[in-house]
């Protein structure tokens, strides 16, 4: 009887993790869907796609700036109630986007979504770890990452198809509908989760007195910047430099997203077993991929293979950084993850900005080399941190998280 009850609790726990993963899918789909709809949105409001692209920048920087202050405001709210509340904001904001009669109104709706996003990603990783079965932390984070990757593989292409078929507004409405379904599921499967290790302003001095953790924050900024310096412009690079068709470019993006799922599986299996070598190894792979971007551009097949390994590398690096933050700040998870989310979005914006400067001042061909240069800096920092604070990283890694087969 006890075994049956235990099995039931484990199944419920995994259902909760899967629900959070679907929520991650919804959030990441809406974050990047404007990329696939910019031309249509710009046409609707009488502006170019480039000018409409400001909505992507605004979104990223709102998330970056709002993550920590918002979390400190709501950090003591019971987690399930908080999660449901931000989904209500998320849904209402998508309705505003659907009915937007001006670009300003659309931006207001996107800011509402960004605010929900800022809180969601500040608490989700910690929630997944809390509700996952004992000893399955990396697996739970891997499942969340799979939901994130699926946004690239399925969410963005399907959203684009909907936008092309019946209009971009209906893409936003459909995402809001998915969010409503997710809200109902989370109401049913998530247990009440009192705020735990949420932290406060008092947590900040404690967090920033941990040099290994501060080092991981800096490393996150550099890694994300390196990746997005090149990846932000993979579409124009593929079509203008590699001279592949727009359909093949879409295929490259799908392969990249699908490889992220492979990366999440590799992370769940091997990160816990190799806490000091996993991250540097995949920073090396990320560096190699960006260095090779131009040299292999003349071969469509080589570009396909590169996209696959690049997708794996980026996912493994981002997940490994995230779990390092959780390990090193287990007494203030929400605040530390809020900082992580903000830094991550600063990296997205910083990478896109650096890539834009490279294209404007040098040329499009050079974005991979500049991204690789930044990635090499990240590798050197990672090696320094893991050598100098080796024992702290080993002590922070929970042994029971390692699963043997």
Image: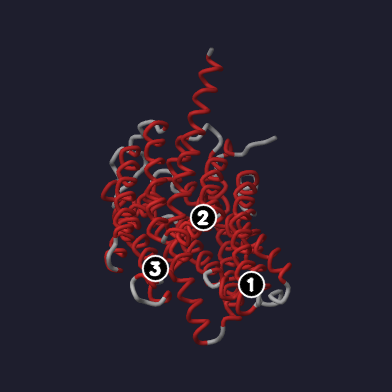
Which quadrant, please, contains the N terminus?
top right
Q: Is residue 299 left or right of residue 35?
A: right
- Circle 3/circle 2 CB separation < 8 Å: no
- Image quarter in which the C terminus is found: top right
Q: Residue at x 28, y 46 (%)?
A: 74
- The answer to whether marks 1 and 3 mark residues whose Cβ atoms lie closer than 8 Å is no
Determine whether 285 is above or below 237 in the image: above
Residue lying at the far bottom of the rendered structure: 361
Does residue 202 appear in the picture of this structure?
A: no
Q: Position of residue 308 (x, y in %)?
A: 66, 60
- The circle drawn on residue 245 is 1
Residue 253 appears left or right of 333: right
Crowdedness near tag 3: few (<14), some (14–19) or many (≥20) residues, C-alpha within 10 Å: many
Q: Relative to residue 140, is residue 224 depicted above or below? A: below
Residue at the spot of label 3: 41
Q: Is residue 40 above or below residue 188?
A: below
Q: Residue at x 56, y 65 (%)?
A: 381
Considering only order in the chain, which callout, 3 or 1, is on the residue closer to the N terminus? Answer: 3
**Which residue is at 48% across, 49% downward?**
25
The disc label shown at residue 158, or none: 2
Position of residue 148 relative to residue 230, above or below, is above
Tally the numbered discs. 3
């Amino acid at each position: 009887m006890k075994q049956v009850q235990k099995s039931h609790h484990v199944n419920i726990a995994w259902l909760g993790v899967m629900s959070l993963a679907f929520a991650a899918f919804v959030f990441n789909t809406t974050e990047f869907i404007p990329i696939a709809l910019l031309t249509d949105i710009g046409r609707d409001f009488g502006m170019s796609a480039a000018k409409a692209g400001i909505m992507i920048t605004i979104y990223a920087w709102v998330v970056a700036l709002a993550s920590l202050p918002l979390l400190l405001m709501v950090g003591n709210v019971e987690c399930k109630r908080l999660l449901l509340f931000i989904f209500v904001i998320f849904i209402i904001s998508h309705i505003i986007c659907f009915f937007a009669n001006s670009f300003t109104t659309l931006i207001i709706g996107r800011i509402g979504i960004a605010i929900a996003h800022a809180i969601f990603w500040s608490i989700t990783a910690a929630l997944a770890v809390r509700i996952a079965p004992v000893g399955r932390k990396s697996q739970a984070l891997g499942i969340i990452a799979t939901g994130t990757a699926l946004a690239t593989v399925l969410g963005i292409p399907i959203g684009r198809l909907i936008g092309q078929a019946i209009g971009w507004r209906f893409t936003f409405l459909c995402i809001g509908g998915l969010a409503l379904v997710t809200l109902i599921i989370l109401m049913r499967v998530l247990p009440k989760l009192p705020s735990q290790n949420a932290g406060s302003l008092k947590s900040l001095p404690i967090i920033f007195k941990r040099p290994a953790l501060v080092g991981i924050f800096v490393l996150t900024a550099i890694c994300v910047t390196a990746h997005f310096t090149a990846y932000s412009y993979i579409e124009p690079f593929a079509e203008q430099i590699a001279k592949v068709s727009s359909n093949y470019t879409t295929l490259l993006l799908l392969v990249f997203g699908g490889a992220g799922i492979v990366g999440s599986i590799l992370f769940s299996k091997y990160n816990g077993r190799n806490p000091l070598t996993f991250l540097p190894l995949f920073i090396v792979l990320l560096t190699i991929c960006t260095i090779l971007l131009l040299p292999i551009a003349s071969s469509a097949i080589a570009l396909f293979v590169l996209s696959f390994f690049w997708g794996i590398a980026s996912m493994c690096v981002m997940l490994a950084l995230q779990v390092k933050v959780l390990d090193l700040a287990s007494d203030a998870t929400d605040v530390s993850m809020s900082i992580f989310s903000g830094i991550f979005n600063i990296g997205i914006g910083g990478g896109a900005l650096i890539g834009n400067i490279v294209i404007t001042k040098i040329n499009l061909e050079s974005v991979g080399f500049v991204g690789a240069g930044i990635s090499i800096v990240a590798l050197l920092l990672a090696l320094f941190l893991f050598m100098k604070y080796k024992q702290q990283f080993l002590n922070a890694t929970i042994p029971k998280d390692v699963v043997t087969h």
